[in-house]
Amino acid sequence: MSEQKFTRRIFLSGALLTVTALSLTGCADSQTQLVKMEQAGAFFNPEDLTLLNDIAEIMIPRTDTPGAMDAQVAAVIDAMMMTWANGPTRDLFSNTLQKIELMAETMTGKPYSSLTLKQRQSLISEIDVTAFSDEVPDYAEGYKRLKDLIFRVFYSSEAANADYVPIPGQYRGNLTLGEYESLMEAYSYGG
């Protein structure tokens, strides 16, 4: 019985992630080059998703390789807030996004969503430098954890690892002692 619940839970979590990733569509503002999310995700509201998506894309931009938007980083993090994160972690990430929005208004006099791409890149760069400096501002822990999560989600995505092979060759887990010893000799693992 517990295996069925566990399996169902995994299935539902995966379904939530898929539905969230597919439904997080936005439209780009031609003046600011900001992709604004039109719908709320499972956890974040449209404004927070827009901010998260843009921060991730600034950190990992699309070049000749996929960027954070291509890997649906914001959608995955949104789903993780419902399936992986506990209350304090959810609060930390929500508060971090609010602080970034507040810093945009404090530093530029404009909300984050009305800044140009160059201004947003400069803002995130300045926040990054300050968060990793010796000053340790109040947002440093949340920003560092958010940045870490963005990179972990991106680098574990299929978009970032299109040619990843988990185990090269065949897996043979049930070897006889003779087969094992011959493999050890063949690959010089014996010393």
Image (cartoon, rainbow, N blue to C red):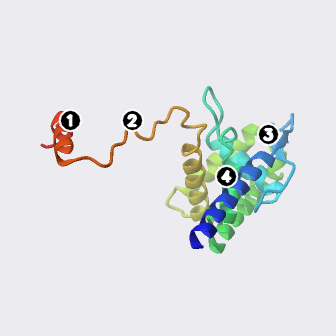
The amino acid on which the numbered mark 1 sits, given as a three-letter code, is: Tyr
- CA–CA distance between discs 3 and 1? 56 Å
> Could you tell me how many numbered marks the image carries?
4
Q: Where 183 falls versus 84 (above or below)?
A: above
Mark 3, mark 2: which one is toward the viewer?
Answer: 2
- Residue neighbourhood size for the residue with mark 3, other residues' Cα within 10 Å, grouped as few (<14), some (14–19), many (≥20): some
Q: Secondary structure at mark 4?
A: helix
Between disc 2 and disc 1, whose residue precedes?
A: 2
Instruction: Choose the circle earlier in sequence order: 3 or 1.
Output: 3
User: Amino acid under label 2?
Assistant: Pro
Q: Can you tell which of label 4 and label 1 is closer to the viewer?
A: 1
Q: Residue at x 61, y 37 (%)?
A: 159
SS at mark 1? loop
Q: Amino acid at mark 4?
A: Val
Mark 3 against mark 1, which lies toward the viewer?
Answer: 1
- Along the viewing direction, whichever of 154 and 102 lies nearer the viewer: 154
Q: Earlier in the sequence, mark 2 or mark 4?
A: 4
Q: Which residue is mark 4?
A: 76
Quarter occupied by residue 45: bottom right
Which residue is more in the foreground, 113 or 186? 186
The disc, 4 or 3, on the residue closer to the chain's N-terminal end is: 4
Residue that mark 1 sits on: 187
* Marks 4 and 1 close (CB-CB < 8 Å): no
Residue 138 seen in the current view = no
Label 3 sits on residue: 116
Rounded to the nearest whole Å, what is the CA distance between mark 4 and mark 3? 26 Å
